Image: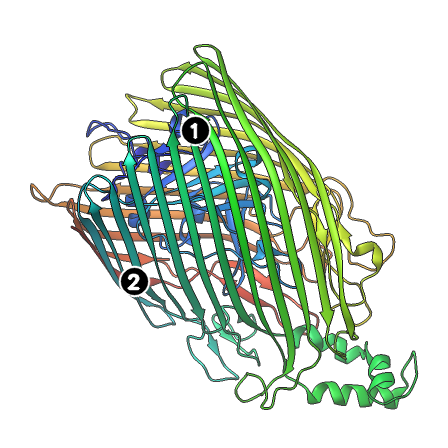
Amino acid sequence: MTAAIVMPSASFAQTAGGDDAANTSTAADPDQPADIVVTALRRQSTVQTTPIAISALGEEQLSKLGATTIADIVRQVPGLQLTESDSGRTRVSIRGVQASGESTVGLYYGETPLTGPSGTNSDPAGNTPNLNLFDVERVEVLRGPQGTLYGSGSMGGTLRVLFNQPDATKYEGAVELQASDTRNGGFGYFAKGALNVPVVADKLALRVVGYRERQSGYVDYTRLDRDNANRATLEGGRAILAWTPSDDVSLTATALFQTQDIDGTAQYSSVLGPFRTDFQIFQPWHDELQLYNGVGRFDLGFATLTTSASWYRWDVESTNDNNAAFASVISSARWCPLYTRVALGIPTTTCNANQRAAYQAYARSKAPFGAYQPRYVTNSIQETRLSSNGEGALNYTVGLFHENRFDRVDTLPFAGDPVTGGQRDPVDNLGGRNILTSVEQTAFFGEVNYRPVTPLTLTVGLRHFDYTKTVGGEYQGYNFTNGQEPRPYEETTADAKGWVKKFNVELQAARDILVYANAAQGFRPGGANNIPNLPAQYLVYRPDSLWNYELGAKTSWFGRKATLNLAVYRTDWDEVQTSVSTLQQGGGNFNFIYNLAGVRVEGVEVEAGLRPVRHLNLNASFNYNNARLTSDQVDSTGFITAPGRMGDVLTYIPRTTAAAGVEYTPPVTDTLNGLVRLDWTYTGRMNTELRETNAFYREIGNFSIFNARVGIEADSFNISLFANNLFNKYGLNRVASATGSPDYFVASRPRTIGVNLRRGF
């Protein structure tokens, strides 16, 4: 956010140059804040001279915020939203462009865009990688469609995490340690280290990073007698090898590995009270990510050629408690005829009282109900682009992108053990299935900037996409609680090709005043559903697309001691891919993707920073976001629930968000400064369903969180005490509701206090 703009942010290593390499901030007088250098447009510029809505947080800013993952920066960036449905399951969105299906935000780690497994609901956007942000040079958040440079996953915006790069001129490194305690929970800690080694002076360097983090749990299982069950452990590391044989050539290889283990759910019962849950199935989560990337940059004089090749595999294992979902189905005996016909050998389309009783006795004998889901995604990605050098009147970036993605999910519904909350021994398989998804996509893209006169720049961007998506699956047995019948492997294919466009006008009205107008198109591929008993007309869902129109201004004042940036935007979103439920007597067990109503999003963003005197920094941001349906959600078949009506507000998108911070770093000695920092974030009111008449409609949000930090810092050393969620606010972020069951909440982490020590060398 703007705090990163007005605050100098220095990493302990400079980068090696190239598109993703830039000094974190421009040089500045001690009394004049620096402006972060970014590469969002595939060339170097600063935040204040980039004609799009962009926020950037440098390494120092991330450290002072205590940000270890993307979730820690969400409220620092206007319009950035992370919705957590449960431990390990998060969805990232920007400016209210949030929906099931392919991701609406392009999430890049270095040169690699990461997409999660599709799962059973064709929803890869529901899983966001939780990679650690230690030894990260900066995080860039580009708001609004970025498809002409970053692809179809960037219809709402792009989030880039850029690692510190090896430096072949010197040895250096850093160590960071932290210990903490969470109210209602337990002890947490992390230990992280980074080391930079020049293997061959000025030519070859290696940078390695390793970390282990234990996040304390705070949710207790009352039935299973387990405390602090949502405890999480992250372990991982990365190695980057950079070779610069000449000033015109650089080659970089990156290897990254991380595991995450979450012992149990973060949801707690509305009846039992904060952080107590009565789930009957224990719900652990394990994921493992390995990523490999190679980048070559070649300075051709007139332009720079960049080639990148990536491969990653992301494995996830999770267990779900399905008792709430099945309660109404069993009560209504929805699948009694299937059970009576198959298990009892009595042909029938309706059940009498005795048959209903027999079915319900069978179903209850299998309780508690759980589902084990192992899944994985592999992706091979190549991109080549050519970007012009220099600052002439004409500049360009053109490129070619290709990906070949495959993922698989297996579902094992099981009868649970009421004592352990796990599977019975031997395993009682209630009817499994698997789903395989493949996506192959090729795109040509480019942007051309032309400056007809000195203060005016015109930009045109185009991307041509061509994709094929195939979804297939096999049903491996009867499931008498959701109506599944055995079916051999079948697959459905969806494909499309077309153009994504962008137009931008930039006017440098004065040295410190930039105004711009932007019209950009966003696009997501369509696909295919694969769930039991789905009529043919619902198998394939169409692509959705949007246009975003934006006016913005970036200004600096009082000798650049203050910045004020403003953006006003409107987004028209058509054929929105939406997660819907089957409408069946006794409740539906399946969600799938369907094209329903259109959406219009209107909003305003404000970012401001001020450094009134040396050692004092102030920052603030505000976002107003009004995302509503532009037509009724209507399904004439009556098969699905389609409760939305024109004017309804989209779910889980706060109407307003805000943040503010103050940081004071007074000198203590000639070599030491003090540190006093206070951050405030506000999450506005959200609704959990579209219609207020929906039985599950809830209003949540409307809460403030305060974080505080005090300490002492030097050039290569700092120690601080911190308190996150200082006033221990139970801010609700998510509600899970089901007929006949209490609501289950996901809330902000309780007050966490601790000590942090960082040393560079």
Residue depicted at 62% across the width and 50% down the height: 102
Q: Residues within 10 Å of mark 1 (few under 14, many from 20)?
A: many
Which quarter of the rendering shows the N terminus? top left
| Left-right relation of 334 to 346 | left
Q: Which mark is residue 753?
A: 2
For the point 36% across and 19% down, which residue is it?
512
Name which of mark 1 and mark 2 comes first in the sequence: 1
Instruction: Classify mark 1: helix, strand or loop.
Output: strand
Q: Is residue 671 left or right of residue 271?
A: left
Instruction: Please tell me which residue lies in front, 396 or 81.
Output: 396
- The Cα atoms of the two marked residues, 1 and 2, are separated by 34 Å
> Can residue 111 be seen by looking at this rendering?
yes
Horizontal and vertical percent position of residue 586: 79, 72
Furthest residue toward top: 453
Res. 100 in view: no
Above or below residue 484? Residue 690 is: above
- The image quarter containing residue 184 is bottom left
Residue 377, percent from left and from top: 56, 59
- What residue type is disc 2 on? Ile
Residue at the image point whose x is 52% and y is 66% from the top: 316
Amino acid type at mark 1:
Asn
Residue 565, label in figure: 1
Q: Position of residue 251 (x, y in %)?
A: 35, 41
For numbered disc 2, what is the local secondary structure? strand
Does residue 543 appear to the left or right of 460 in the view shown? right
